């Protein structure tokens, strides 16, 4: 990563400020480790690579996620859109405007090429991660609009219904998705807005979600953040440093599926409303029993510190296991799933109130994995059936996307010049 | 301001990081001036004072705003709530949990006294600013539920209907309001959530709004941010440094109104949807003509730099004024309002999409003033009738609150120990 950004001359200094803070951060001081990266860092996360950025990139603090419907049946238009998105995304992640003329450099008589609200803001670690949904291959009527059904990944099927699901179609699905993560939410919003604008006439925004605080760490250099139940979340998450585990659990490998997906991944998004008012009326003991960890340090109920492995066999009074049978940590643990793991990258959200005096808030769950049918689906089946926490949760949105493999630079590290090469070329 | 916070031992270091960045910020370096304060600063903004914090406090980057309905008719319960809110708010702005036992220090068999999601986060410049709406004095049926109609400020009346208003009752009004501003949105959310929780049975959340990016500067040390039209917003805003102007335009003065309001202010909130997709299809020239400033530097169309006063008399081709007659800057300028000014403190927002493929986004306008009937109301009348920008705006929420004067510490700087003393005591 570099502290360099060219959005404006002002950014050089910002980059320097950001780099200083990042230095402290990566050094792993206890003091810095619990402090999110600066809001306006000049950090640039490289766009090009074998995999897309925004998956194992250390989770930025803010999210703006968007799902689009493709409103054309013309394959060329779709391919051209993905090529245009590639160029714009690569620019914006460098802290540049969406197109060369930008917000103010074009003809006075034409609409500007960039919407301008990020003009003075640095790159802020922006990543843009793109995926395609099952409906791109077969729409609601079963039509293969783009003649790509033979390239459909076998793993890209609609998620099944889970016990307790209360899904809103207007917050679910989508032909395409963009996950924008950044240290500054205005930078993330600007990116999605400009991609939507570039797609005018080809795509229509289906739903979007702002996330105000990350709930997972994706690097050992990051501290574990807290969800809206007040607990540390994702302690045992997969981390960027676990290269072998990522190949095993996150990245699609050669021979897994259709060729073009090699180096890609699958993204499960779930909008999970938390009934926080009810949760807040339960005792500390009950909360810790449900989660299976202490609220303060996040240590498992079987003892130790945050990163101690839970001892699921250890019993206490009356021979009851210290980590309850229905606790979240037990049912989500790899030992309950034959060693299978996922990379979580979720965010806390709030969308105001629900009309009944309660906050409309919760966790926008995002997870990356190599094979959802063998990873998320069995996990969620077990959790939705048995997790004590389910009493306080309501899944209101759901989507699955095949995350495209990364794009190479002009030199051709990957042999792909645009998002969607391999799928549409 | 101090870099000290006691939420956890970890925060000391964070404070030091924050203080360093703030130092650079206040020094006014061009590089730092365009960089918002760090997201996780340990800065503590003092809660106690003659005026409430969060008005002339340099505008933090993130907002969570909530309006509540009082659901009791018992004046004592309301007074006790405001006393409890005072204690909790003062603690949280210091980076502490909402109550002494906090999230994990209380009895195991009782619900925790704090919800915990800000446990490891520093103070982050949190300010909490409280107000009371007209409906507290006379509800929809005209009832004076709390026997306070004789203390109603004359200036606290429902705002009139303005041309083009398309207000949603579910996003308007309220008996009480809390404006939470912070460098970290999770800190602002945590504060509102814990205040709502303390008010269980006394108040019910009516509406709330997350703001992801500030659109105004309230200090000469801050750079001017951009709204979602991509323009710098609030260049000519009132600033904390203009003490005389604040007394003239923002703070209620002795003799203005009911005694207890001295040192208070009035807050106008307007949720303004921006039709950004339409705006994005207009030419740069048209955009600049509408705003009356250039998009790049924010200079008035009559020339100069951002802080040059517009020359409304200067004409160009065909004797047309360079700053158009219907431009926003001309109609909002103090010269169009007999010298009257307001202190703006708004935020960009997005609440997902609107079901028609467009972003539900805009400006959550917040402004503070001494007398809304002679400041906001005539301004908005002129703007809603003549501002060229109105074509791209839709006001969807509206509220007016009397902002309580500040609270003193135990020593009694103000003679008030709790929010609402003077109104309810």
Image (spheres, coloured by chain):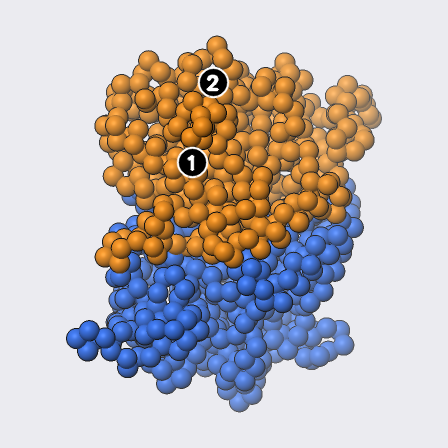
Chain colours: A blue, B orange
Q: Which quadrant of the figure contains the N terminus of chain A?
A: bottom right
Read off the residue under disc 1: B178
Residue at mark 1: chain: B
Q: Position of residue B74 (x, y in %)?
A: 23, 28
- Residue occupying the far right of the picture: B317
**Residue A188 visible in the picture:** no
Q: Which mark is residue B262?
A: 2
| Foreground residue among A285 and A405 | A285
The C terminus of chain A lies in quadrant: bottom right
**SS type, badge 2:** loop
The residue nearer to you, when weighing B399 against A27, is A27
Q: Quadrant of residue A164?
A: bottom left
Which of the chains bears the disc numbered 2? B
Kindly give the residue lying farthest to the bottom in the view shown. A255
Q: Earlier in the sequence, mark 2 or mark 1?
A: 1
Q: Give the number of callouts.
A: 2
Q: Residue at x 36, y 21 (%)?
A: B423
Q: What residue do we see at 36% from left, 61% from top?
A: A295
Q: CA distance from mark 2 to mark 1?
A: 19 Å
Residue at image point 74% right, 47% down:
B31
**Residue pictured at 31% horizontal, 39% vertical:** B199
Residue B187 appears at what percent x and percent y?
47, 48
Asked if residue A389 lies left or right of residue A56, the reply is left
Disc 1 on helix, strand or loop?
A: strand
* Disc 1 packing (10 Å; few <14; some 14–19; many ≥20): many
Q: Mark 2, residues whose alpha carbon is within 10 Å: few (<14), some, or many (≥20)?
A: many
């Amino acid at each position: 990563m570099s502290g360099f950004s060219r959005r404006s001359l002002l950014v050089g200094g910002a980059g320097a400020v950001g780099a200083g803070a990042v230095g402290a951060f990566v050094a792993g001081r206890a003091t810095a480790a619990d402090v999110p990266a600066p809001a306006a860092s000049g950090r640039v996360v490289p766009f090009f690579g074998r995999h897309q950025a925004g998956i194992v990139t250390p989770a930025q603090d803010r999210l703006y996620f968007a799902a689009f419907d493709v409103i054309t049946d013309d394959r060329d238009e779709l391919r051209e859109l993905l090529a245009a998105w590639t160029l714009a995304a690569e620019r914006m992640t460098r802290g540049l405007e969406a197109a060369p003329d930008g917000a103010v450099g074009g003809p006075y008589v034409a609409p500007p090429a960039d919407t301008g609200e990020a003009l003075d803001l640095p790159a802020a670690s922006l990543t843009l991660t793109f995926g395609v949904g099952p409906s791109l291959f077969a729409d609601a009527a079963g039509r293969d609009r783009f003649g790509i059904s033979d390239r459909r990944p076998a793993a890209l099927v609609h998620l099944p219904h889970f016990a307790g699901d209360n899904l809103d179609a207007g917050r679910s699905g989508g032909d395409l998705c963009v996950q924008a993560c950044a240290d500054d939410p205005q930078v993330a919003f600007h990116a999605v807005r400009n991609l939507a604008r570039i797609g005018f006439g080809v795509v229509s925004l289906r739903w979007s979600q702002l996330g105000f605080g990350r709930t997972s760490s994706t690097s050992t250099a990051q501290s574990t953040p807290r969800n809206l139940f007040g607990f540390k979340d994702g302690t045992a998450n997969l981390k960027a440093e676990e290269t072998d585990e990522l190949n095993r659990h996150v990245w699609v490998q050669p021979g897994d599926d259709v060729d073009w997906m090699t180096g890609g991944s699958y993204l499960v998004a779930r909008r999970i409303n938390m009934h926080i008012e009810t949760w807040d009326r339960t005792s500390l003991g009950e909360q810790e029993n449900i989660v299976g960890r202490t609220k303060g340090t996040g240590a498992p109920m079987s003892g130790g510190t945050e990163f101690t492995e839970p001892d699921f066999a250890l019993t206490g009074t009356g021979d009851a296991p210290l980590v309850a049978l229905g606790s979240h940590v037990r049912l989500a643990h790899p030992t309950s799933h034959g060693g299978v793991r996922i990379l979580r990258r979720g965010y806390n959200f709030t969308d105001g109130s629900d009309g009944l005096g309660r906050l409309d808030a919760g966790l926008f769950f995002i997870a990356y994995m190599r094979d959802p049918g063998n990873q998320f689906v069995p996990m969620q089946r077990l959790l939705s059936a048995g997790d004590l926490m389910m009493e306080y949760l309501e899944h209101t949105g759901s989507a699955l996307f095949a995350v495209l493999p990364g794009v190479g630079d002009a030199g051709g590290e990957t042999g792909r010049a645009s998002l969607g090469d391999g799928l549409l070329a």
